[in-house]
Image (cartoon, grey):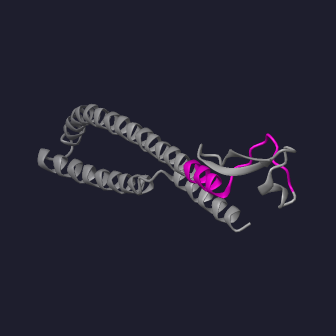
Amino acid sequence: MTIMRPAQDGRGSAAGAAIHGDGQAAGHAAAGRVETGRHEPGTGELVRQATQQVSDLMRAELRLAVAELKDKGRHAGTGAGLFGGAGLVALYGLGALLAAAIAAIALVLPVWAAALIMGGALLLVAGVLALMGRGQTRRATPAMPERAAEEARQTVTELKERAHR
């Protein structure tokens, strides 16, 4: 006697498997194995799982990149604000010191010569500061999430290696 019973393929759909009166599965007995209660996913199921896992991994990498860029942006904004505040206070202090320096030099030279000397010194200091600022700005670029990009490259390399096995 043969009874047709649906067999699970991992996605809920059924494929027919003939069961003889002795309990042996006809389709699997010919292949040399007997169907047990354990479910082994098929190739389609494994591909679906791998695709889902890669998709989840890429989403996680993107979330990491966004978080890293937000963190860098927050630090850059805070640093710029602090630099702005420091610059304003320094400007007032520098104005007071300039007036004092010009008054001191004016004791020896005419006032116009004292102001000319102080103006040249200030331009020299401004040039040095501008060069230092350019160097610091170059270190901050490109604004790229370096850790997230490296992890994504490693993930792609690992997936390629596993695919070739």
Q: Where is 26 relative to 11, above or below?
A: below
Is 109 placed left or right of 163 in the picture? left
Q: What residue is at 84 percent from the left and 43 percent from the top?
A: 23
Q: Is residue 40 magenta?
A: yes
Q: Quadrant of residue 72?
A: top left
Q: Quadrant of residue 81?
A: top left
Q: Position of residue 116 (x, y in %)?
A: 17, 51
Q: Position of residue 88 (x, y in %)?
A: 25, 34
Indicate the position of residue 135 as horizontal and vertical percent values. 41, 56
Image mark count:
0
Q: Residue furthest front?
A: 1
Q: Is residue 55 left or right of residue 19?
A: left
- Is 48 magenta? The answer is yes
Residue 128 or residue 165, whichever sits in front: 165
Residues drawn in magenta: 33-53
Q: Nearer the viewer, residue 157 or 53?
A: 53
On screen, residue 48 versus residue 98, left or right, reads right
On screen, 107 above or below 156?
above
Q: Position of residue 30 (x, y in %)?
A: 83, 61
- Of residues 31 and 94, the one nearer the viewer is 31
Q: Nearer the viewer, residue 9 or 53?
A: 9
The residue located at (72%, 51%) in the rendering is 17
